[in-house]
Structure formats: structure tokens, C-alpha cells
Amino acid sequence: MENRAQWGTRLGFILAAVGSAVGLGNIWRFPATAYESGGGAFFIPYLIALLTAGIPLLIMEFSLGHKHRGSAPLTFTRLNKKTEWLGWWAVFVSFVISTYYAAIIAWAIMYSYFAIGQKWGADTETFLYDFLGITAEGVGPGKTGVFVPEVLIPLLIVWAVVLFVLFKGVRKGIEIANRIFIPALVVIFLIIVVRAVTLEGAGAGLTAFFTPDFSQILEPTVWVAAYGQIFFSLSIAFAIMITYSSYLDKKSDITGNAFIVGFGNSSFELLAGIGVFAALGYLAGQMGEPVQEVVAGGVGLAFVIFPLIINEFPGMNGLFGFLFFASLVLAGMSSLISIVETYVAGFSEKFNISRSKAVLLGGGLATLVSLLFATQGGLFFLDAADYFINQFGVAFIGLVEVVVVVWVLRKLGNIQEHANSVSSIKLGGWWKASLGVITPIVLGYMMFGLFKQNILGLHDTDNGNYEGYSDAFILYGGWAVAAGALIFGLLFTLKKWNPELLGQSSDTSKEDKAV
């Protein structure tokens, strides 16, 4: 077997890893989460979560991928043959996420165009629903309707770009793309932030964002929010970081890379919080309302509130709007490339096929499935799938991964030895305590609360379901999607690996070939 593909430079890997971590959630999830969880006081549990869960887990996944030199399924197989299913579970969670993540990027592409001339008008919420085609009669949760051309066409463009990058391989595709996307993203967002903080009323927004409410630090929900934000924003348990680190040079600095990626991601989140709340402060001032009345997160912030801000923007508002949605496109594309790479690498190794065939197989299937989210009912499927696959896929995998590696297989010592052999920052008791005690307890508490909330129906809705969706829709649009990732993961373990692949030393694997 030939040598495994590698990153061209350490910077190339760091940009790719940061590009994966910095995604849509940094821009539209973190600001609202921080504001609602104590403002400036939230940064204390957030920093503790970064140092006791985020970076320790990054180090563990970097070390696993670097040592065993394979995709997540192959890495876990080499770790212990009985844990292959864990790698495939993470891969299929990534597969599901990629199908709807591409649709959100497609929305952002269209909104970049709509920003020129503010084509969304004054009622931005109604425009969003009209754009997605969900105001048509008979279209609702569980009903797909027909394709929406304004979503379908940019969606196909997104997939064309992503698959082209992956066809080119690790060094000539993924690395070059991130060398373009990430600097461009940072420059564009810096322009947005600088302009936003100079707006009238920006100070009120920043005051609301940074003013600490220390009374909330004692609330368990705030700590859960901090650990949840760190966990979801660092691309942990997606199979991404294991796959990316498998392309590292033998002597790469594992712990140093993890600290750079972890703090790089958090720095962008802070930058996003400043930009978003400066703009929200301006909007509140223009509307004559307090800042708390215009705070929103997720899709609502990006596609409803920000268009309102752009409408009120003094001078060159079309350019400001274009830059904001362009930043969403860049952040989303860098993350989507990393997500798709997990199953491209997995399929290539499991079925002993070339990268080009794996891209066609995995990327082609994902493209077909993603067409569901370009239909009139696509938003509802996206909302349910996103909630359940993140909470009962990513978060649950993270808990299982830590428990299996640390407590069942007791491999923490071996992983520590490997990381220390190549790293400048040596691991000690802090790292073992974080992964052995703190992370399992916090993730376990999170999962207990989520299962209790969703199984016992404790959501604040009439029927107790997430967003008040029907039982049938929650079953096949939510639970079935989350369970399906695990089921497919188990099924893929039935196919045997190529004996030559399993028999290699940990430093060689199948060559990553471009077309």
C-alpha cells in the first residue's frame, strides 16, 4: 500500500480544522446563547468548558486519527475491532447533517443576491416563508410539496463546488479551498464588525451582550449551555477531526494544534457576538425598542432579523447585506467540505475504492437526499432532523465515545503517551480528569435532560413535542433519522475490511487519489 495522503503544511491542517469548526453556529447560535445565559458572566463557564471538554476532546480525536492513520471507522477498528460501529455511527450522523447543511448554504447564496436592493421588503419573516414555499395551501410539517427552484438551483451549485474540491483530494482540494475560504471569511467578517460597532446604538447592543449577570452562573442550565456550545461548535464527534488528523505528518504537534484550533474557533465566536449585538443594538434603536426585544438565534437571526437590520442600515446597505450572507456561505462551505470528507474517506477505505469513486458514491447519495430540503416542506424536515441528529446523534456519540475509550477500553494512557511523544505541550492530570470525570458527567447530565424532555414530552407546547410537531412527524422526521444513523453504522460493520488494510502499520493507509 502507498503512503497515506498528507496535508501540505501544518498551516493547511489548522486552517482546515478551524474551517470545519467555524460554521453557521458560530454566527447565529453563540451570540444568542451567551446573551441568554448571563451575558459577560457566560464567558466563565464557557472558558472552563473549552479547557475541560473542548480542547481535551480535540486532543483525543487528533491523537486517535494521527496514531491509527484512518477514517473514523478504520481508526476505531484499529483501536479495537469491537468499536468499528462507533466510527460508522459518527460517519452517518455527518451524512445526515451534510444533506440539510447544504440547503442552508443555498439559502445564504440566494440571500446574498436578495441583499442587493433588499428584495425581501419590509416583512422579512413573510418573505422567508414565501421564499421557501411553505405558505402554499396544504404545505406543512410532513408534506414535501414541490421543488422550490430558488433553493434547488443554488443547492446543486453548492454540491458541485464541494464535490469538485473533494475530487481534488486533501492537499490540492481541501487544503487549497480552506486557504481561500478562511482568510476571506475573517476579512469579510472583520469589515462587518468594524462597520457594525460604529453604528448609532451599537453601544447598547454591546452593553447587553457583555454586561454580566453573575447570578446565572449558579444555574445548571447555563453550564449545560456552555458545554453544549463548545461541544457543537468544535466539530467533535462528527468523525471530522479524526479523519483530518489522519492526514497529518508523523511528527505533528497534536496538543499545540488542538489549542490553536480551540482558541481560534472561540475567537471567531467572540467576534461574531460583537458584530451581531452591535447590529442588534442599532436595530433596537431604530425601532425604539429595548435590545432584548430583537434578540434571536438560528435561522430567525440570519434570515429574518439581519434583513431587518440591513433595511435600516445607513448607506451601502446592499453591500453590507451581501457581505454578511457571503460570510455565511464561506463559513458553511468550509464546514460542509469537512463533513462530507468523513464518509468519502470511510467509503474509500471500507470498499477499497478510489477517492473519485467514493466522492461519486457518498456525495451523489447525499445530493439526492438533500433534494428533500429543496421542496416546499423542506424547512420542517430540516428543523426536526437538525434537532434530533444533533442532540441524539452528535452529543450522544460524544458521551459514548468518551466512555468507551476511557472507561471500557482504558486507552487514555496509550493516547496520552502518543500525544506526548510528538507534542510540545505535555498532557497530565488535567487532561485525564477532564476526559475521565468532567466530560462524561456533563454530557451524561445533558443527555439525561434531553431524553427526559423528549420522551416525557416536557417541551413548552400543547402536545409536548419539539416545536409542537405531530407525533407521527416527530417519529419519522426526528427519532427515525437519529436512530437510522446508528442502525446504518451497525450494518456497515457486517462487511469485512481488506485484510491488507488492517494489517498495515499505523502510519500507512490507502493513497488519497484525485481524479
Image (tube, helix red, strand yellow):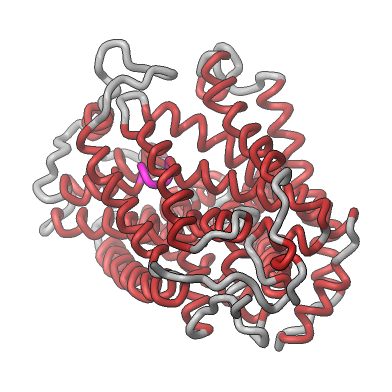
In percent of width and height, residue 124 lies at 23, 34
Q: Residue at x 29, y 67 (%)?
A: 188
**Was residue 102 drawn as part of the magenta stretch in this picture?**
yes
On screen, residue 77 above or below 446: below
Residue placed most toward the observer, 74 or 253: 74
Q: Residue at x 86, y 73 (%)?
A: 414
Left or right, 425 with reference to 178: right
Residue 38 seen: yes
Residue placed most toward the observer, 297 or 386: 386
Q: Which residues are magenta?
A: 100-104
Residue placed most toward the observer, 258 or 116: 258
In percent of width and height, residue 362 lies at 48, 49
On screen, residue 185 above or below 397: below
Q: Residue at x 78, y 86 (%)?
A: 421
Which part of the image, by quadrant, shows the C terminus?
bottom left
On screen, residue 256 above or below 497: below
Give the overall secondary structure of the magenta segment: helix
Left or right, 487 with reference to 147: right
In percent of width and height, residue 235 lies at 57, 57
Total marks in image: 0
Left or right, 465 with reference to 113: right
**Was residue 240 drawn as part of the magenta stretch in this picture?**
no
Which part of the image, by quadrant, shows the N terminus?
bottom right
Give residue 103's quadrant in the image. top left
In percent of width and height, residue 161 lies at 31, 58
Residue 219 seen: no
Give residue 57's quadrant in the image. bottom right
On screen, residue 443 above or below 74: above
Left or right, 468 with reference to 403: left
